[in-house]
């Protein structure tokens, strides 16, 4: 999935640059959040990649705005939960049919991780609302 | 910042994007933003190059993970600032390096997950898959090591 381009023409300084990058990455994450609600593999994968981009941007601009650290940590936890669910999706796709009990366990763990990701996404959105460099449109 | 450590940002700026970047900035704010961009690109390039060197010297699972993480961070930065500091060639190199480590990462992670998830009563069914994943992880790590030995992230 290609990242949404960040429009930087006429950018004035580091803070302006950070604001524009974060604004774009937050918009991207919110656009793809439907994948998490639908719980499907492809949609969740795209959402996870978008979360990664946003997390890296948040961490990069921490020097300019220290409060971004808390949001970045929330996205790291969200990314972990999504990653655990993704790994189980990959393993389930190659698991021998005869491994019924293992499959059952992996599916339960996958759903538990998706539930955790839904909860963490709710928390992360609340933190984004308080983020000084991000304005929701 | 040393001359060697600044190769990438200098190269990006030398190849014309510096002028482009400056044109897009308000005149009185150029130095701070240019300085930030140069410093950040150089820092993330050094992190990737360092992780690559450590993996090449001793190809462990942990070091492979470090290369991939540093690569993703650097790629994300280059994509974020592409409009003011285009560096298509460098971005291609970083993407290629990530692709070269995908198979090793996938096989290793899935192998670990399977080892920890197999139901005790199904161990015998899992054995062929465990053996296949183990062989795949070993071979993919060898290939990643060979390719990353030649990789350079200098523009």
Image (cartoon, rainbow, N blue to C red):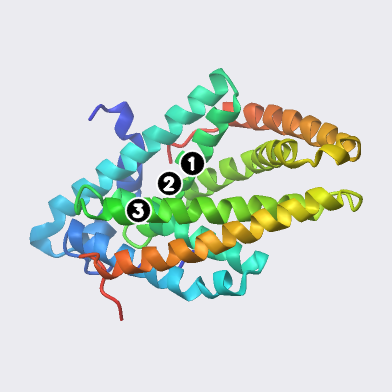
- Whole-percent x, y for residue B70 in the image: 45, 39
* Nearest the eye: B147 or A28: A28
- Label 3 is found on which chain of the structure? A
| Mark 3, residue position | A72
User: CA–CA distance between discs 2 and 3?
Assistant: 13 Å
Q: CA distance from mark 3 to mark 1?
A: 15 Å
A135 on left or right of B119: left
User: Badge 1 is on which residue?
Assistant: B69
Closer to the eye: label 3 or 1:
3
Query: In the image, is residue A71 above or below residue B94?
Result: below
Q: Evaluate if marks 1 and 2 touch, with contact meaning CB atoms under 8 Å apart.
A: yes
On screen, residue B68 versus residue B108, left or right, reads: left
Quarter containing the C terminus of chain A: bottom left
Q: Residue at x 57, y 19 (%)?
A: B58
Q: Nearer the viewer, residue A71 or A102?
A: A102
In the rendered structure, find residue B73 and report the number of the disc placed on it.
2
Q: On the image, which quarter does residue B39 sit in?
A: top left
> Farthest residue toward the front?
B121
Q: Chain of mark 2?
A: B
Whether tag 2 and tag 3 are in contact, CB under 8 A, the answer is: no
């Amino acid at each position: 999935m290609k990242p949404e381009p960040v429009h930087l023409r006429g950018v004035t300084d580091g803070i302006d640059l950070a604001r524009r990058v974060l604004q774009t990455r937050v918009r991207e994450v919110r656009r793809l959040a439907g994948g998490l609600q639908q719980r499907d593999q492809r949609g969740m994968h795209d959402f996870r990649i978008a979360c990664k981009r946003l997390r890296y941007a948040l961490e990069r601009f921490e020097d300019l705005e220290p409060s971004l650290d808390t949001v970045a940590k929330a996205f790291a936890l969200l990314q972990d939960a999504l990653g655990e669910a993704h790994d189980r999706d990959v393993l389930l796709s190659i698991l021998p049919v005869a491994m019924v009990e293992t499959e059952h366990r992996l599916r339960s763990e996958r759903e538990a991780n998706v539930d955790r990701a839904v909860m963490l996404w709710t928390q992360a959105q609340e933190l984004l609302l308080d983020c000084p460099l991000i304005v929701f449109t | 910042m040393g001359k060697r450590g600044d190769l990438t940002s200098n190269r990006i700026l030398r190849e014309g994007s510096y002028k482009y970047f400056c044109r897009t900035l308000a005149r009185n704010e150029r130095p701070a933003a240019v300085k930030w961009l140069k410093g950040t690109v150089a820092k993330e390039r050094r992190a990737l190059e360092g992780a690559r060197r450590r993996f090449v010297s001793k190809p462990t699972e942990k070091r492979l993970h470090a290369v991939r993480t540093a690569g993703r961070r650097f790629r994300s930065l280059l994509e974020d600032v592409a409009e003011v500091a285009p560096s298509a060639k460098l971005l291609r190199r970083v993407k290629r390096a990530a692709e070269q480590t995908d198979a090793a990462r996938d096989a290793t992670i899935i192998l670990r997950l399977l080892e920890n998830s197999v139901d005790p009563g199904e161990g015998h069914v899992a054995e062929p898959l465990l053996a296949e994943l183990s062989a795949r992880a070993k071979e993919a790590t060898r290939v990643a090591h060979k390719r990353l030995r030649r990789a350079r992230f200098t523009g």
